[in-house]
Image (cartoon, rainbow, N blue to C red):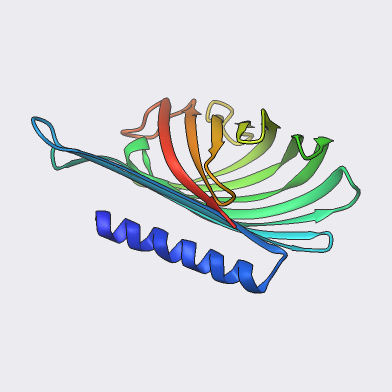
């Protein structure tokens, strides 16, 4: 499994380098991390994440994906993934629209697959080289396949904010929060938030420390109300 993940990460890095070399409007970011402990207790944890963005005048196209897996003493204790695409259109310097589609899975949190379709508005409060802060408001249609069987269909709202701040030339801070009220089942709302620090090692590579919290108010069978994930990954930007 370790070799497979490193091959995937290497392939992502190679593709991003190739695309960046031939298309200036195309940028990419990939990150990967692994922790292997052996002795009285054996454990393995692997994480990979990638995003690529293509900008064409006022249009922005992006694709993204992530994967995480943890084994403890030969028993799988965590496994989740996400893949998706998004389109943005800039209407003014501070206002835009977006549409997105993604699929995700977290069997240890109660669902085999969750498909989400998003549509909404994006408004930037601050746009500069040192600081960015924007809000998004929109609608989400969500289809979920719980581990306990059956299918749920939900109409949801989406409120999102992201803040980025360069603390100095090598250190930056990022925080985002997302609230998803459920109009179909008012008890089944979701809340996600993440804070991270990024330390630049050189013009391409950096070290990222992140803490992610995911909360679902109405849990499926075998799920959890709150899931937290702490990661330390090597990041490459192109």
Q: Quadrant of residue 70?
A: top left
Q: Position of residue 62 (x, y in %)?
A: 64, 58
Tell whether 132 sits left or right of 16: right
Residue at 45 percent across and 45 percent down: it is 234
Direction right: furthest residue: 92
Residue 137, above or below 104: above
Horizontal and vertical percent for residue 192? 55, 31
Name the residue nearer the viewer: 233 or 1. 233
**Going by the picture, which residue comes out furthest to the left?**
40
- Examine the image and state in which quarter residue 10 appears: bottom left
Locate residue 99 relative to residue 144 in the image: left or right: right
Residue 96 seen in the current view: yes
In the picture, the quarter occupied by the N terminus is bottom left
Q: In the depicted view, which residue is nearer to us: 218 or 204?
A: 204
Left or right of 226 on screen, residue 194? right
On the image, the x and y values in percent for residue 172 come to 62, 33
Residue at the image point whose x is 77% and y is 40% from the top: 129
Taking the image as drawn, is residue 71 in sight? Answer: no
Q: How many marks?
A: 0
Say which of 169 and 180 sits in front: 169
Residue, x 48% and y 39% (percent of image)? 207
Position of the C terminus by quadrant: bottom right
Residue 105, percent from left and from top: 41, 48
């Amino acid at each position: 499994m370790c070799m497979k993940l490193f091959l995937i990460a290497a392939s992502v890095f190679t593709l991003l380098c190739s695309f960046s070399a031939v298309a200036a409007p195309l940028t990419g970011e990939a990150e990967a991390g692994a922790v292997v402990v052996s002795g009285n207790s054996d454990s393995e944890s692997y994480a990979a994440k990638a995003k690529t963005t293509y900008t064409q005048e006022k249009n922005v196209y992006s694709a993204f994906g992530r994967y995480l897996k943890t084994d403890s003493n030969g028993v799988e204790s965590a496994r989740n993934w996400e893949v998706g695409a998004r389109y943005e259109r800039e209407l003014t310097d501070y206002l835009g629209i977006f549409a997105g589609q993604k699929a995700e899975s977290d069997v240890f949190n109660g669902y085999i697959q969750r498909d989400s379709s998003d549509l909404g508005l994006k408004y930037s409060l601050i746009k500069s080289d040192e600081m960015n802060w924007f809000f998004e408001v929109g609608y989400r249609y969500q289809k979920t396949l719980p581990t306990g069987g059956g299918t749920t269909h939900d109409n949801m709202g989406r409120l999102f904010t992201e803040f980025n701040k360069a603390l100095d030339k090598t250190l930056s801070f990022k925080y985002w929060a997302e609230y998803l009220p459920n109009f179909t089942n008012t008890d089944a709302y979701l809340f996600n938030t993440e804070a991270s620090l990024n330390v630049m090692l050189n013009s391409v590579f950096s070290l990222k420390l992140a803490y992610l919290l995911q909360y679902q108010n109405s849990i499926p069978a075998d799920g959890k109300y709150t899931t937290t994930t702490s990661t330390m990954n090597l990041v490459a930007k192109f």
